[in-house]
Image (spheres, grey):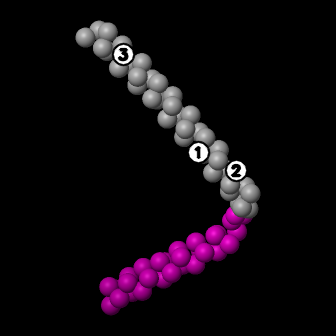
Amino acid sequence: MAFLAKLKQSFGTTFSFFSDSFAELKKVRWPSRKELTSYTLVVLFTIVLVTVYFWVLDIGISELVELIV
């Protein structure tokens, strides 16, 4: 009997978790299409900048190692 009680309790907490999650998702303020586009552009621009930075750093370190070797 204890096993069934624990099983019922775990299913109850699982359902409670999902119902609470859906309730919290309803409170979220979702971005508009314009905001989402601008956020996406900012992220892409930042990724390009970081990629170029590390590429230049990698080239510089490679050249430095070539000079040493």
Please state the horizontal and vertical placement of residue 67, each as a whole percent of the image. Answer: 32, 9
Tell me the quarter of the picture where residue 49 sits. top right
Gap in angstroms between the C-alphas marked 2 and 1: 10 Å
Q: The C terminus is located in which quarter?
A: top left
Q: Which residues are magenta?
A: 1-30
Gap in angstroms between the C-alphas marked 2 and 3: 38 Å
**What residue is drawn where x is 29% and y is 9%?**
68
Give the left or right position of residue 39, taking residue 48 as reference: right
Q: Is residue 37 above or below residue 62?
A: below
**Mark in front: 2 vs 3:** 3
Q: Between disc 2 and disc 1, whose residue precedes? A: 2
Task: Name the main secondary structure of what is drawn in magenta.
Answer: helix
Give the left or right position of residue 63, taking residue 47 as reference: left
Q: Nearer the viewer, residue 7 or 47?
A: 47
Please state the horizontal and vertical placement of residue 39, each as a whole percent of the image. Answer: 67, 50
Please state the horizontal and vertical placement of residue 10, each as a whole percent of the image. Answer: 42, 79
Q: What residue does disc 3 label?
A: 63
- Residue type, label 2: Ser
Give the left or right position of residue 56, taking residue 39 as reference: left
Q: Nearer the viewer, residue 38 or 7?
A: 38
Q: Nearer the viewer, residue 50 or 59?
A: 59
Mark 2 nearby-residue class (10 Å; few <14, some 14–19, many ≥20): few
Mark 1 nearby-residue class (10 Å; few <14, some 14–19, many ≥20): few
Q: Between disc 3 and disc 1, whose residue precedes? A: 1
State whether residue 9 appears in this view.
no
Q: Is residue 67 above or below residue 24?
A: above
Q: What residue does disc 1 label?
A: 44
Question: Element type at marker 1?
Answer: helix
Q: Is residue 32 above or below residue 64?
A: below
Q: The N terminus is located in which quarter?
A: bottom left
Q: What residue does disc 2 label?
A: 38
Tell me the quarter of the picture where residue 22 sits. bottom right
